[in-house]
């Protein structure tokens, strides 16, 4: 089983109203779940700014460091 990199989760159905998901996450990344498996992460802009990420490359490197071997 893969480890999630955040305590915040949402389902694909909840993404029909993304602003509610972001409001509930309180500025933290959200794991997007489909059939009990993580399919991606929703990363709020304020989280990106808080962590001093200033380019797409830095964001990609930060997210890549989250990868977990299966």
Image (spheres, rainbow, N blue to C red):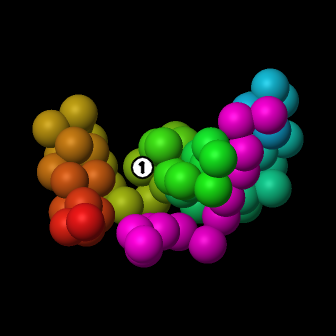
Quadrant, the C terminus: bottom left
Dominant SS of magenta comes to loop
In the figure, residue 5 lies in which quadrant? bottom left
Residue 8 magenta-highlighted: yes
Q: Front-most of 58 and 29?
A: 29
In the figure, residue 67 lies in which quadrant? bottom left
Q: Which residues are magenta?
A: 1-13
Whether 30 is drawn above or below 57: the answer is below
Disc 1 element: helix
Whether 3 is drawn above or below 14: the answer is below
Whether 61 is drawn above or below 3: the answer is above
The residue wearing badge 1 is: 48
- Tell me which residue sits at (61%, 72%) in the image: 7
In the figure, residue 66 lies in which quadrant? bottom left
Does residue 18 appear to the left or right of 20 in the view shown?
left
Does residue 9 appear to the left or right of 40 in the view shown?
right
- Tell me which residue sits at (40%, 69%) in the image: 2
- Tell me which residue sits at (20%, 67%) in the image: 69
Q: Position of residue 6 (x, y in %)?
A: 53, 69
Within 10 Å of disc 1 (Cα), the crowding (few <14, some 14-19, many 20+) is some
Can residue 22 be seen here? The reply is no
Residue at the far top: name it: 16
Count of numbered tags: 1
Q: Front-most of 68 and 53?
A: 68
Q: Position of residue 40 (x, y in %)?
A: 46, 43
- Tell me which residue sits at (22%, 43%) in the image: 60
Q: Position of residue 52 (x, y in %)?
A: 32, 56
């Amino acid at each position: 089983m893969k480890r999630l990199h955040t305590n915040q989760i949402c389902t694909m159905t909840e993404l029909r109203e993304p602003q509610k998901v972001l409001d509930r996450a309180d500025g933290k990344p959200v794991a997007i779940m489909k059939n009990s498996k993580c399919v991606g992460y929703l990363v709020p802009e304020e989280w990106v700014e808080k962590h001093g990420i200033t380019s797409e490359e830095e964001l990609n490197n930060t997210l890549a460091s989250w990868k977990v071997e299966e």
